[in-house]
Amino acid sequence: MKLSAEKLDLRLRHTFTIARSSSDWAQNVLVRLRDGKYEGLGEASPARYYGQTQASCLKTARAMSRIVKDASPFDLERVVDALERRFPKQPSARAAVDLALHDLLGQRAGLPLWKYWGLDPARTPQTSYTIGIDTLEKVRVKLAEAERFPVLKIKLGVPGDDEIVKEVRRLCPKKVLRVDANCGWTVAETIRKARLLEKLGVEFVEQPIPPGNNAALKRIKDRIGLPLLTDESSLVPADIPPLRGCVDGINIKLVKCGGLRRALQMIHAARACGLKIMIGCMIESSVLITAAAHLTPLVDYADLDGNILISNDPFRGVKLDKDARLLLPKGPGLGLSRR
Ligand SMILES: [Mg+2]
């Protein structure tokens, strides 16, 4: 197979702010894997937080050419393992190649990935729509734009954030609200704020404190009245077993775990540990979002709105019904087409 990689610059509709960063563009990477008459697509969304950039992803993806050169899509397990050994710190670039391999497997079989895996497309959840941190005035504009979404994920984790969630609840009394603090709070703050979130009927709180302290997560879980989910604390399959009993659920992201193969491992590990599962995203085009969507018949919650937050998505794949439930594509592999 012949691998090529190119820049994929995605323009955000609004400046996107979370507890630790703010951006107008996502500088992603598109990977193409040529296998005879077939072409598999993959995408990397580099995370600066983990020391990745568009340049490092391009360089890594191109360096992966040698490993895939003499392989076929049916060598997926061996290739994914080899890439992980050779590039342990580059899960985003590995995810791009893992996606392209899965796209090719499905195309070779003539089946959409969900069907290849034997999953029920009627079991996909609704996706939430993310409201990034902003002034109350801007939050109101974003809420108006998010009118069609019955489930909202509110980014908190900065001073004064109580006012944001209170305002969202005031303006959206009926919607399901989820809160993501992106490591912005302490244990004491989380316990205090959870009382307000519970009173506002928030469904769950995601990653309130920084990763690396599962005992602190357990202290929070034992003291709050709403479910606690991790994101930054649950990056790879090995992170799951130690979280058993410390939290209620995990968020999985393809670019953090290394792709669909590792995400499947995380789903099975989390189920075995009695944890709820969300599948989430970064700012991504329909390539990564659609790949993640193929897994959603296996999960409880979806937060797959990265492609909706951008204005220049070059691809079409997963769609939404009128209630924002994910509609999986019927085409083979990832089922993507050019816009
Ligand atoms: Mg998160």
Image (cartoon, helix red, strand yellow):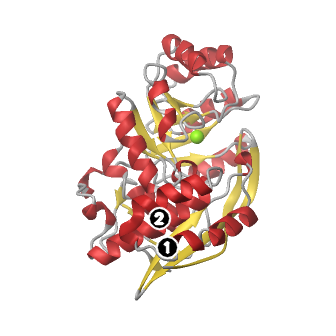
Residue that mark 1 sits on = 41
Q: Which residue sits at x=65%, y=36%?
A: 182
| Residue that protrudes farthest toward the bottom in the picture | 37
Marked residue nearer the N-terminal end (2 or 1): 1
Type of residue at label 2?
Leu
Mark 1, secondary structure of its residue: strand
Q: Is residue 307 visible?
A: no
In the rendering, at what x and y percent does residue 21 appear?
76, 46
Type of residue at label 1?
Leu
Query: Left or right: 279 with respect to 64?
Result: left
Q: Is residue 113 visible?
A: yes
Q: CA–CA distance between discs 2 and 1?
A: 7 Å
Q: Is residue 102 above or below residue 281?
A: below
Mark 2, secondary structure of its residue: helix
* Callout 2 touching callout 1 (CB < 8 Å): yes
Q: Is residue 39 above or below residue 177?
A: below
Taking the image in four quarters, ligand 1 sits in the one at top right
Residue that mark 2 sits on = 99
